[in-house]
Image: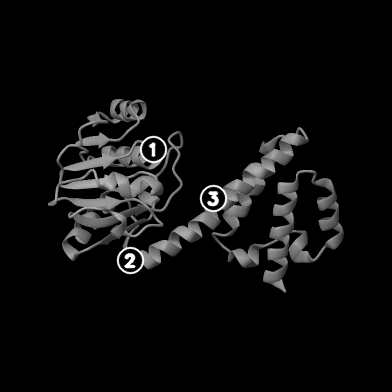
Amino acid sequence: MKTVIIGSGNVAYHLAKAFTQNNIKVHQIFGRNEIELSNISNEFNIPYSNENLEEAELYIIAVSDSSLENVSELIKNENALVAHTSGSLPKEILKGNYRKASFYPLQTFSKTKVLDYSKIPFFIEAEDQIDEKSLFELASIISENVEVSNYEKRKYIHLTAVFACNFVNHLFARAKEISDSQDLDFNYFLPLINETVEKIYHLDPKLAQTGPAVRGDERVLKLHEESITNEEQLDIYKTLNESIKKMYQ
């Protein structure tokens, strides 16, 4: 299918890269940010525009959830298949008389981080089996892990991802605040972080839990609380320890 990617952010960049690496031709990348579009265009030899949206058979919209509805209105081709990459929104958020779908890659994307696209799960949803099959086959060129999924399942996949990725990364950032405040090299903690992640390949996360809260060590918990001077850090510390205690009561 003649394909256009709409967007210039992290997801659009990595889709353009994944498609190019797997010899899937992208006919245009379209968006608002000309600098980012130009960078993607130069790196992957894809024509770009921030003014004229090319006619295509497949449009993949990789923009923020807050922009998705408005951007989808730019597509006037009623014969097109239009898929968004959002994990949290239904395909019905797309506004137009074209065929609607979802093409959701379950991964955290940063432009500077190299990824193995073959390991990324893709979740496909479409209005009919023909489009579902087309998108499934397209994703299967990129990834070894492709599934058909309805919105209800995808919604909870995305919610789980927020807990497992976004919240965890925020804790890394908060941990680095503490280490920086005490002139501690954050690299000290990378083996610990790696082992924590590695463990859940072999153990249920609930069984892998360690630390003072699961042990009920109130002395250490109190010591930590007295050492934290940042109110937001203290709130997080108390909230998470209470959650751990309740899980293991």
Q: Are marks 3 and 2 in contact (CB under 8 Å)?
A: no
Circle 3 sits on which residue?
Answer: 166
Residue type indicated by callout 1? Gly
Q: Which mark is residue 9?
A: 1
Circle 2 sits on which residue?
Answer: 150
Residue 52 position, x and y percent, is 20, 33
Look at the picture and state if 175 lies above or below 45. Answer: below
Residue type indicated by callout 3? Asn
Mark 2 is surrounded, within 10 Å at the Cα level, by few (under 14), some (14 to 19) or many (20 or more) other residues, namely some
Q: Earlier in the sequence, mark 3 or mark 1?
A: 1
Of residues 213 and 226, the one nearer the viewer is: 226
Q: Are marks 1 and 2 in contact (CB under 8 Å)?
A: no
Residue 74 position, x and y percent, is 23, 43
Kind of element beneath mark 1: loop
Q: CA distance from mark 3 to mark 1?
A: 17 Å
Quarter assignment of residue 17: top left
Q: Report whether 145 appears left or right of 174.
A: left
Q: Report whether 78 appears left or right of 93.
A: left
Residue found 71% across the figure and 48% down from its top: 232
